[in-house]
Amino acid sequence: MSGSSPIQAETLTDTPTSLDSPPFAAMFKASEIVNAAAAIAEAECIEQLKKTDAVPLLMNWLLGQESIVCSDPTTVAAKLRKMVVGGAGKTVVISDFDYTLSRFANGSGERLSTTHGVFDDNVMRLKPELGQKFVDLKNKYYPIEFCPKLTMEEKIPHMEKWWGTSHSLIVNEKFSKHTIQDFVRQSRIVFKDGAEDFIQSLDAHNIPLVIFSAGIGNIIEYFLEQKLGAIPRNTHFISNMILFDEDEKACAFSEPLIHTFCKNSSVIQKEAPFFHEINGRVNVILLGDSMGDIHMDVGVERDGPTLKVGYYNGSLDDTAALQHYKEVYDIVLIHDPTLNVAQKIVDVINSIH
Ligand code: TMP
Ligand code: MG
């Protein structure tokens, strides 16, 4: 696929036509040559793919795991084949953060923290009265977020109230950037097993990672800086950002507000600097844990497949909820504390290029 680089196209179009110009440059448009090169490269990849059994092996592995549900293996295999032919250069990963890249529960089954939850824990320690307000909000609204009896339309006003109240508490308290970084250091946010390697391997293969979170983007940034040393070049955020005043005290939140059920094109600002980087990335690996995560890819204009991988953290007795996940996600991972499946998918995509 390297023959299809835009640099080649530019060089050909920008070369002034002279009597010495090679005849092929006069006869063909640069774009035609590039398209032809891309078609040849794609045909080569398809040949390569036929020779390897990378996709069937991954499918066999997925289908052999008790805690992985793949309702339509034919479709999943077809999406994987397209993604492998496209390679890393055509791939983008769009991932939720809370309980997707981060763990839902520890080894003893205790619930771990979301990015907003960082305030519940730390503020409870320092100012129990205010801490209790964050906890009360969570106890009231979390069951509504996951209530199977309410429609999304019915849930949205509650989510707006939850996020709005929580953000007001943060801004009114004027937490400093330094304090929040300290909260993150002492938080119960834990990476899923393999998450660090997954993020680094995406960076190493120049696959953009867009973290699309209804949590708090600054907290994710501080967490990644603390765990990885720095934010990898390939990693970008669509999230709620705390804005700080000149004294580095929280003074507002970014607009538009992103809650669980508006993670779609309505909140994506396409002028974001990273958008040029994902332009042309037609194949999407989508990672999420809630029903609100399944449309995170709609802001990306393209005609390639989205492979939707969903973490199911709910009860196994809730068969209706589990069934719903099986219908909307291509691959459902039940109580999976790892990034193994996503890593295997990326490894297969990288395998023949
Ligand atoms: P996300 O996983 O889609 O990014 O959603 C963020 C999660 O954060 C969502 O499940 C609700 C949760 N949350 C809290 O735990 N505390 C809060 O104060 C708010 C506003 C959200
Ligand atoms: Mg989540």
Image (cartoon, helix red, strand yellow):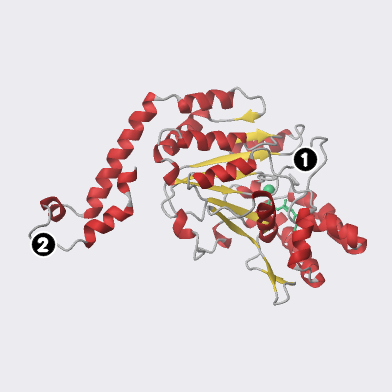
Residue 23 lies left or right of residue 228; in this view the side is left
Three-letter code, disc 2 = Ser
x then y, percent, for residue 102:
70, 45
Expressed as whole percent of the image width and height from the top left, the position of residue 349 reads: 46, 36
Which residue is depicted at the point 77% across and 40% down? 105
Mark-to-mark CA distance, 1 and 2: 68 Å
Q: Label 2 near label 1: C-beta < 8 Å?
A: no
Ligand 1, image quadrant it occupies: bottom right
Helix, strand or loop under label 1: loop
Examine the rendered structure and indicate whether residue 286 appears above or below residue 138.
above
SS at mark 2? loop
In the rendered view, would you say 320 is above or below 137? Answer: above
N-terminal of the two: label 1 or label 2?
2
**Residue 132 can be seen, yes or no:** no
Residue furthest out toward the right: 129
Residue 18 numbered mark, or none: 2
Question: Which residue corresponds to mark 1?
Answer: 105
Q: Position of residue 51 (x, y in %)?
A: 37, 24
Q: Which amino acid does label 1 sit on?
A: Ala
Tag 1: Cα neighbours inside 10 Å, few (<14), some, or many (≥20)?
many
